[in-house]
Amino acid sequence: MVPYAAAAPQRDAEVLEPGAALDRAVAHLRSLQHADGWWKGELQTNVTMDAEDLLLRQFLGIRDLETTGRAAERIRSQQRSDGSWALFEGGSADLSTSIEAYVALRLAGDEPGAEHMRSAAAVVRSLGGLDRARVFTHIWLALFGAWSWDAVPALVPEIMLLPRWAPLNIYAFACWARQTIVPLAIVFAHRPQRHLPFDLAELAVAATAAPAAPASRSARALGRLDRVLRAYERRPLRRLRGHVLARAERWIVERQEADGSWGGIQPPWVYSLIALHLRGYGLDHPVMRAGLRGLDAFVIDDADGRRLEACQSPIWDTALAVVALSDAGAEAEDPDLVRAADWLLDHEVTRRGDWSVRRPRLPASGWAFEFANENYPDVDDTAEVVLALGRVAHPDRERVRRAIERGAAWVEGMQSADGGWGAFDVDNRSGLARALPFCDFGEVVDPPSADVSAHALEMLADVGRIAGPAARRGVGWLAAEQERDGSWFGRWGVNHVYGTGAAVPALIAAGVAPDDPRIRRAVAWLHEHQNPDGGWGEDVRSYNDPTWVGRGTSTASQTAWALLALHAASEGGEPTQRGIDWLVRTQRSDGSWDEPQYTGTGFPSDFSINYHLYRLVFPIMALGRLTP
């Protein structure tokens, strides 16, 4: 594997021409390709991943001094001057992240009296202390006896028995939430406590205001349900409880991926390991060994310390890299593109996963995000892979044609009833799931989004299916989702710049004319939100605060998204040229760009991502399409 890591700026004193800047970026991107054909940039998140990795190892009894020390270095390096830790670069102090980071440093031996620990504890207390932490932080504290299980919202494993038509069955939740809820239901049934070698009295607050009463009727009803479930938890039906725990255990084991993960993402992974351990799986059990070995493969340990990737994105990165090189002028027969296509073809999903619950007759296909995630292919990756395969003149053209046909048909089949596309599931939009007291962090459903729907639509146009009913409904849905200001909301990227950068090229590919009023409104919005320096940027805070919509420090990826939309809309005027100039002017001497900002989205507002390859592939696409 060729690692990709940001370095200190090394810009040339003399700015290159756009064509030379593009050549330099392309050379850098090619240098990062793995011998097997794939690309993967680091997927950087906040220190929650590193803290919870240490907490997991403490719970399982496998934490060692070297791992702890290296992770602690990383956690300390990310502490802000006020003593807190944030969810993203430039973000405000986050209470739960700061609590988990603090506990991890206590495990590493940092004394409460140390200056950095005193300042961290002061921030935690100022934000409300342990009482005001999110539910998932309370769960971690409860695992170690630092929080009462009685003070955590109820979650019973009997949820496994609810039929698929029931409002709160496990398939009413998004795949990432579903995979987390099932193992946590086992954990809640066991209520384990592995006490820490210290207490957390310094994080306590003497008195805090009572939480606000639920405002909506459904929230009040779910609050009453929570009380009923708590009462049941005190006296569960023993035979029924044994049956559902065994069923949940089988469900988890059946969904372990080839790389040892669950869904290729951290939350269900760590909770599945804890749940199975509580069910009697020893550390030498093959399922546990594979899970722990897989976690180690998600670790990056370098000069910045030891850190855990929440996920890895090789299929997504590889598809984007192929499109970028093609945009930059690479021949369809280029050996690098052919190797990438070979690797992508080998990773097509051929088995039926949870998506088939809603689509039982849809033939299996699609591509996932990660190296190994056969249970959960997604629409976004599949659309991008199909677009990439269409750029390559592969020696086995028939194999590529069949894969493209299967992928396109699978995407069509995953369309929701309203005409849009979610990422992993169909018609997954339960309001009740969102309102559960348990669900106070991150999105727990997977409704259609403008960016995923746009990518699906662009792909259908590329493979000649734009006249079909799925594409026609998709155009209608995407047009209806345009905001009043002319932009589109970005679910999986920050934020309106991302959504607009996806929607405009998709609508143009679908046959909407550049002079259509919807396109003109989008172009006007992009022009209005261009920064004085010529770039575009949008802060993660735009998900919560509308005054940040379209506003933020210019970044390479977001500037490229805006330029891709302007190019699709046939906008070649002064704003476009200023955007190109910004990319050329800010390029590093190695061909990449500096981008400490988080422009990817896991959960809007709650979990943001810095995709290290975004700062390279998207500028290459933009410069490739706009440079003569």
Image (cartoon, grey):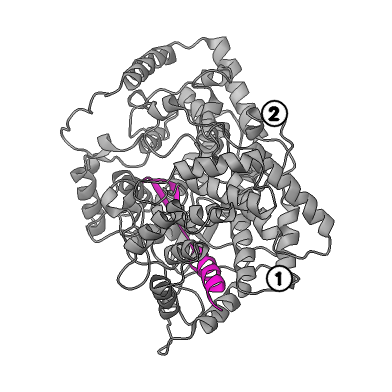
Front residue of this view, candidates 441 and 218? 218
Q: Amino acid at mark 2?
A: Pro
Above or below residue 564? Residue 124 is above
Residue 458 location in percent, x, y? 59, 52
User: Which SS class for mark 2?
Assistant: loop
Q: Is residue 325 left or right of residue 448?
A: right
Q: Amino acid at mark 1?
A: Asp
Instruction: List the residue tagged with mark 1.
Output: 336
What residue is at 55 percent from the left and 17 percent from the top?
Answer: 162
Q: Is residue 351 left or right of residue 446?
A: right
User: Which SS class for mark 1?
Assistant: helix
* Magenta part of the chain: 601-628
Residue 543 location in percent, x, y? 34, 47
Above or below residue 216? Residue 176 is below
Q: Is residue 65 left or right of residue 216?
A: right
Q: Is residue 533 left or right of residue 511?
A: left
Marking on residue 499: none
Q: Count neighbours of disc 1 (C-alpha within 10 A) and say few if under 14, some if 14 to 19, many if 20 or more.
A: many
What residue is at 66 percent from the left and 55 percent from the top?
Answer: 462
Q: Do the residues bearing badges 2 and 1 touch, measured as CB atoms within 8 Å? A: no
Residue 206 location in percent, x, y? 16, 34
Asked if residue 52 is among those painted magenta in the image, a careful observer would answer no
Instruction: List the residue tagged with mark 2.
Output: 360
Above or below residue 451? Residue 177 is above
In the picture, which quadrant includes the C terminus? Answer: bottom right
What residue is at 66 percent from the left and 37 percent from the top?
Answer: 413
Q: How many marks?
A: 2
